[in-house]
Image: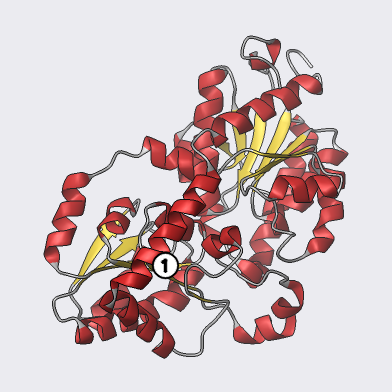
Amino acid sequence: MPSPADSSRAPTKKPVFISAAEPSADVIGALLIQTAKKLAPGLHFVGVPGPKMAAEGCESIFEMSSHAAMLLGAVRLAGRAHRMMKTCRRYFAEHRPTAAVFIDSPTLHLRLAGYAKNRGIPVLYYVAPQTWAWAESRVGKIRKRVDQLACILPFEEEYFRRHGISATYVGHPLMDLLQQEPSDVKRVAELQTIGKPFIALLPGSRKHVVKSLFADQILVAKKILERFPSAAIGVSVASSQVAPIIDEVLDKSAMPVVRMEGRPTALIRAADLVLVASGTTALEVAIHRRPMIVMYQASRLFYQLVGRWLIKTKYLSLPNILAGREIVPEFMPYYRDIGEIVETAIEFLSFSKPREKMRAEFDRLADGLGGAGASRRVAEMLFHLIHERGNIGSR
């Protein structure tokens, strides 16, 4: 890659296009923009940002992140996705940005990457599509449409290179986020004094996930309270989009629950057990060494008809995928009732041995991820791609 002093750090006259179609990608994109602009202050980003990317100065041509879906739920967003693609195609044709960066969301972004490539725009894809888990047919599209692939899981680089794709393992951006985030020791201590054990509910940041999951998390918490009357419950309210859903469930439950908006770090660190929606947050819980149960409630019918034929990996939660075995209980892609979840939760809270075993597994998992620096490495990849393609300066 270019050295810090070379011309690839020079600001470009044309902007860099960047797109993040879901909240977790918005966080990753904001870290990348922040880092890239520190290294090249004249750099300008435009595209499909979430609120955090917009706060870092990314100009928006379309908003998509608050409408994100997981697994096969993206089908429900077909109309909005079509409008997004039409807007972006027009932007590529009229402005031809110096490079295009796509973060996660392959259903949307691999098509957009194809449009960008057809216009001669170099493409950097950040957070590799999980073709090793499902939809391996996408590998050919990645090879044709992506110039550089930034992988965030250690085993992905070798997998994609074996398929003829220029892939680099950059580390996990979550490590960058956690390095930036101060530890609120006082708030953690306050939460731990409310009750014991302290149970954290993390229903996610996607509206459809919170709708399908949070009411069941509250029911599990209610059963825990019956077994441990001195327990306390806290819930993470990830955004203003999911707040009304959470508040409606809380009102109906009439349970005493601590409600925490924004980043869930203090809630996680205070917890004796975390009930977490599947996604990057499950990995964050593991890095904080907190016992967890991973939950997800997909459409059973759609999974049986379509999903089970596409999904190849034995495990679906990130901690288990990285470990290559079940180190955390995962109830997904769906569960029939909460009975087994309640039994698992009570077992964790009743006996220290399973909790300690899980923490030891988390230590090994965190060591394998390495430290911070993913955002800087991806910024360097971007500068190199721009420089390599000769898109600097007046071009």
Q: In what quadrant of the picture does the C terminus appear? A: top right
**Which residue is at 27% across, 42% downward?**
183
Residue 196 is drawn in which quadrant? bottom left
Give the SS element for disc 1: strand
When the figure is inspected, residue 29 is found, relative to residue 296, above or below; the finding is above
Q: Residue 38: x percent and y percent?
A: 50, 21
Question: Where is the N terminus found, in terms of image quarters?
Answer: top right
361 lies left or right of 136: left
Residue beneath the point at 81% across and 44% down? 161
Residue 57 point in image, percent of width and height: 50, 31
Q: Residues within 10 Å of mark 1 (few under 14, many from 20)?
A: many
Q: Which residue is mark 1?
A: 276
Q: Amino acid at mark 1?
A: Val
Taking the spot 75% from the left edge, 27% from the top edge, the residue there is 385
Q: In the rendered image of this protein, does residue 287 appear above or below residue 68? A: above
Indicate the position of residue 279 as horizontal and vertical percent values: 52, 61
Q: Position of residue 275 (x, y in %)?
A: 38, 70
